[in-house]
Image (cartoon, rainbow, N blue to C red):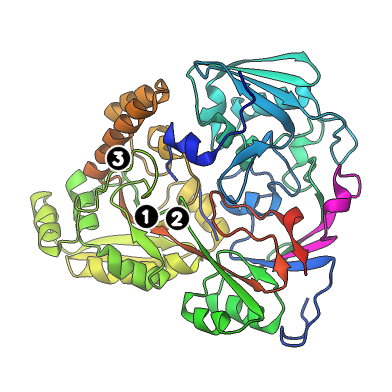
Amino acid sequence: MKTFVHSFAHSLSAAVAAALVIALGAAGPGPASAQPRKDSVVLGMTLEPAPGLDPTAGAASAIAEVTLYNVYETLTKINSDSRITPLLAESFTPSADLKTWTFKLKRGIKFHNDEPFDAQAVKFSFERAVAKDSTNKDKATFANITSIDTPDPHTVVLNLKNGNPDLPFQLGQGTAIIVEPRSAAGNGTRPTGTGPYKLEAWNRGASVVLTRHEGYRHAKDVKMRRVTIRFISDPAAQVAALLSGDVDMFPRVAAARSLKQFEANKKYQVLIGGSRAKTIVAINNKRKPLDDVRVRQAIAAAIDRKAVIEGAADGFGVPIGSYYTPGAPGYVDLTSMNAFDPAKARALLHRAGVVPPLELTMTLPPTPYARQGGEVIAAMLDKVGIKAKIQNVEWAQWLSGTYGQKAYDLTVIAHVEPLDFGNFARPNYYWGYESARFNELWGRIQATVKPEERNRLMGEAQRLVAEEAVAAYLYQPTWITVANARLKGLWKDVPIFANDLAALSWL
């Protein structure tokens, strides 16, 4: 069979395309007079990586935003235009039933500590991902691997339980990084990969500094010798940093309200692109009375999605009715289910035996869309007899308390990873949703490789989680990037949250 250079669009047309979680966070003269240093760049991010810099050990997408394709590499690479191409692999070839995938590895590659990259490193990385103590959020991907063969140092054969047309995409995500066995345990604070950058400094609460790895196989092609990533959560501060020239680029910036001043200034470039993200009101299905589907349906019916998009994202978003995004294969428009209907919301609460006011807590992480959207949603809930007390928390608190300990009633969050519909089948996930019916359906989806049948089953899955109102599904975000006009190599569309720093250069 011919070598597989996989297209994300084709992969998704054959499989699940559901887009934690979660993300968007050097002073100098202003852009009007500044001449940028030709071998360095300052990037802004909303959130700081937590709990560390190992994307296999935490749910936050901010970890991969810093490290994926920069410090760590994967067998495959997901490009800005959604094509899947070999990275550490030289080629990859599937069997006809998609149950056996053969990867030929590139030769002569070394980790930052000079240990060789080879088939044993791949085997170690994937077995580590599925180990009993693994906290890898994509553990299910690796659990589908029944065995790993390494016939020689430069060949890896993955044997799967279920054929998987999405495997090349999944192996290009941060959860599939190839780690060096001896240093892997310290990757949270001392990341060791095969990528073009090494960690120079992590100034907690402020910034991460990466420097070019001169031993990288394509070091001469990496134009940025030094990259500083600053963490700025406040929208006004994000805009100010761009205007002052303190930040050269800000992917997924909260600058919708200031967009015109950037678009009108030739010193900036503005990129507006699509995503596979889903912004939702996550509901703790284990807590009473939220364990009653009628109460969850009432919460969903109390929310005007379009008004939330205006209030949380300044109009940059598309309404969704389930945990799936428009344009994905098998997408079903379910926005009419659990549609905005305050009278229906009150009636559902009454039938559930809820005597208003129902007092709940809405825990909000520091992302602007969550803080702004949470206020809008709380006001809507109030009109149907639900008093949602706002509790603002920092990112680390959200990850440990809300996500980790499930200590919450409601929260507003964007799940940014594609292909994560299987979260509904994850045991002990932070939603607290358990459904034998969904698990059986998801098992059938995983065992199906025919595109038409898989898409049909995905439609059933969308309807089921919408009917059961596991969450209140809000919108698919549209991401905005603002950058210095002289900076080249930026991503416009965002198939995954990554910053491909080695592609950047100054004019």
- The percent position of residue 290, horizontal first and vertical second, equals 26, 48
Which dot marks residue 414? 2
Q: Of callouts 2 and 3, which one flags the residue occurring earlier in the amino acid sequence?
A: 2
| Residue 266: % across, % down | 63, 82
Q: Position of residue 392 (x, y in %)?
A: 46, 67
| Magenta residue check for 302 | no
Foreground residue among 446 and 357: 446
| Residue 394 visible here | yes
Residue range highlighted in magenta: 209-230
- The residues tagged by marks 2 and 3 sit, at their Cα atoms, a distance apart of 17 Å
Disc 1 to disc 2, C-alpha distance: 6 Å
Q: How many marks overall?
A: 3
Observer able to see residue 50: no
Query: Dot 2: what SS?
Result: strand
User: Residue at label 1?
Assistant: 280
Relative vertical location of residue 419 with respect to residue 300 in this rendering, above or below: above
Residue 77 on image: x %, y %: 65, 41
- Give the amino acid type for the residue marked by disc 1 in the picture: Ile
Q: Secondary structure at mark 3?
A: helix
Residue drawn at the location 72% of the way across and 40% of the way down:
73
Point out which mark residue 462 bears: 3
Residue lying furthest front: 2
Q: Is residue 45 above or below residue 195?
A: below
Q: Is residue 220 magenta?
A: yes
Left or right: residue 373 compared with residue 494? left
